[in-house]
Image (tube, helix red, strand yellow):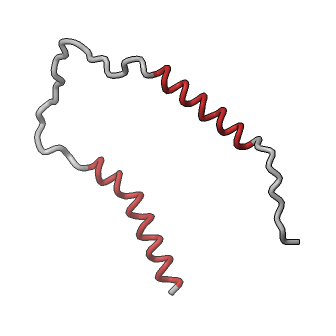
Amino acid sequence: MRFGKIGMAAAAAASLVSAPVLAQASQPVSSVARTSATVDSENDLEGGSGIIIAILAAAAVIAGIIIAADGSEDTPTSP
């Protein structure tokens, strides 16, 4: 039973090590070079939501401090 576990662990380790090597060794089927499309104008997906995220992060930090510093004295009833 113990040798079975060791063998399975060795097989898993070997597959984890060899997978990137095998993926890198494979050659592409065609030798066509990829080119990117031209961009006329950029979009504004961010839209200034950085301030909202900063406010929410600050609120989360303050709430965490308040919860951690809560002075409740919950002592166990067992000796």
Residue 8: % across, % down = 44, 75
Residue at image point 60% right, 35% down: 60
Residue at image point 71% right, 37% down: 65
Up-down: is 26 above or below 58?
Answer: below
Up-down: is 29 above or below 40?
Answer: below
Left or right position of 41 against 69: left
Residue at image point 16% right, 25% down: 35
Left or right position of 23 against 68: left
Left or right position of 68 against 54: right
Residue 55: % across, % down = 55, 25
Residue at image point 32% right, 22% down: 45
Q: Quadrant of the C terminus?
A: bottom right
Residue 52: % across, % down = 48, 24
The image quadrant that residue 57 belongs to is: top right
Residue 71: % across, % down = 81, 45
The image quadrant that residue 56 belongs to is: top right
